[in-house]
Amino acid sequence: MASRRRFSKAFKRQVVEEYLAGSVTQAQLARRYDISPHLIIQWRKHYAAGRLVDHSHDTAQEERIKELERMVGRLTMENELLKKAVQHTLQERKEQSSIISGPGSRRSNGGAR
């Protein structure tokens, strides 16, 4: 009895994507790769369900997403800090420039002219 062949997820994905591209028929693919046409149908179902995805690529993307989320969090905190600093500076300037002692008020030089 012949032993069962094992196919990688990458190979299965390649065959299904070739079929979905529409350049070849299912029967042509089956003959080219010496596999059953029914196998291609099964692989198409697995592909549609997302089971032919390479998980090592996914983990790299997940790590990148986590890194970007941390960066967004840090930048959000910095942005909030800068907003508070601007508000604080504006409040200090407002308190320092009152009507009586503001930078625009000048002392008289000794009476009316």
Image: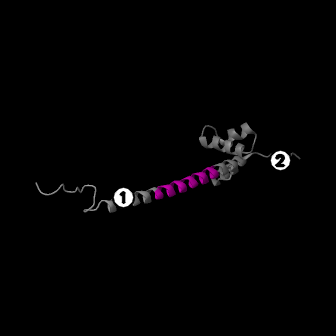
Which mark sits nearer the N-terminus, 1 or 2?
A: 2
Rendering quarter of residue 14: top right
User: Residue 21: x and y, percent?
Assistant: 60, 41
Q: Residues within 10 Å of mark 2 (few under 14, many from 20)?
A: few
User: Residue 100: x and y, percent?
Assistant: 25, 63
Viewed as shown, does residue 97 lie left or right of 66?
left
Q: Amino acid at mark 1?
A: Leu
Residue where numbered disc 2 is placed: 4
User: In front here: 110 or 63?
Assistant: 110
Magenta stretch, main secondary structure, is helix
Give how far apart the Cα atoms at labels 1 and 2 are. 76 Å
Over which residues does the magenta segment extend?
A: 61-81
Rendering quarter of residue 102: bottom left
Task: Confirm whether the magenta stretch covers residue 77.
Answer: yes
User: In front here: 100 or 20?
Assistant: 100
Colour scheme in use: one colour
Point out the image quarter for the C terminus: bottom left
Q: Residues within 10 Å of mark 1 (few under 14, many from 20)?
A: few
Viewed as shown, does residue 73 lie left or right of 59?
left
Task: Confirm whether the magenta stretch covers residue 58.
Answer: no
Viewed as shown, does residue 65 lie left or right of 10?
left
Residue where numbered disc 1 is placed: 90
Q: Is residue 22 above or below residue 108?
A: above
User: Residue 37: x and y, percent?
Assistant: 71, 45
User: In front here: 15 or 109?
Assistant: 109
Q: Residue at x 18, y 54 (%)?
A: 109
Q: Residue furthest left?
A: 113
Q: Is residue 67 above or below residue 19?
A: below
Q: Nearer the viewer, mark 1 or mark 2?
A: 1
Q: Amino acid at mark 2?
A: Arg
Disc 1 element? helix
